[in-house]
Image (cartoon, grey):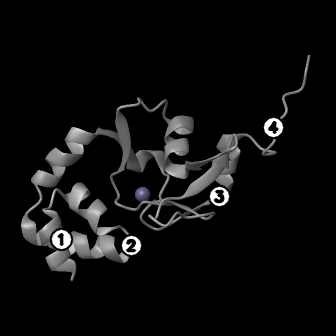
Amino acid sequence: MSRQVRPSGLPLRERLELSKVVDPSGCWLWTLHISSKGYGTIWVAGKTQYAHRMAYEVFVGPIPVSMTVHHKCGTRHCMNPEHLELCSASENRKRAARIPLEEKIVRAHEMRAQGYSKNDISVLLGMNGQLVKRVLG
Ligand SMILES: [Zn+2]
């Protein structure tokens, strides 16, 4: 019997559990490094990985290549598996198409404040790039 060597010291599941604080809305907020785009990141097997994607894989199951992990709560550094769902790129676009323009403008400002680029906002909200630039100034 050989002992398993874990360079990170702890199994991934425990590392995730130890690196969160639960906020009143039930979000598991990531307490370690947050990327410039607002996602929690963790060093796993020699690579920087998104904490919410790792949480999805550890607590729910594998993420198919063609899918993204969507935050139902809208908080990018949340990793509560109950707040995460798989979403295809076309679903993301369909969802965005159902949001009224006034609400998109409000969201665009919020996303900008959270550090999203204008290009990301344009893609994620399905808004014309020129419009995003005009709205956000
Ligand atoms: Zn959440």
Give the SS element for disc 2.
loop
Circle 3 residue? 19
Q: Which mark is residue 114?
A: 2
Residue type indicated by callout 3: Ser
- Distance from disc 3 to disc 4, alpha carbons, whole Å, reads 18 Å
Question: Looking at the image, is mark 3 or mark 2 nearer the viewer?
Answer: 2
> Residue at position x 68%, y 42% from top?
12
Q: Which residue extends farthest front?
A: 130
Q: Position of residue 50 (x, y in %)?
A: 53, 50
Q: Earlier in the sequence, mark 2 or mark 4?
A: 4
4 horizontally vs 132: left or right: right
Residue type indicated by callout 2: Gln
Circle 4 residue? 6
Give the SS element for disc 4.
loop
- Distance from disc 1 to disc 4, alpha carbons, whole Å, reads 46 Å
Q: Earlier in the sequence, mark 1 or mark 2?
A: 2
Q: Which mark is residue 132?
A: 1
* Residue placed most toward the observer, 64 or 131: 131
> Residue at position x 19%, y 74% from top?
133
> Residue at position x 42%, y 60% from top?
76
Q: Residues within 10 Å of mark 1 (few under 14, many from 20)?
A: many
Give the SS element for disc 3.
loop
Q: Position of residue 40 (x, y in %)?
A: 54, 58
Q: Quadrant of residue 130?
A: bottom left
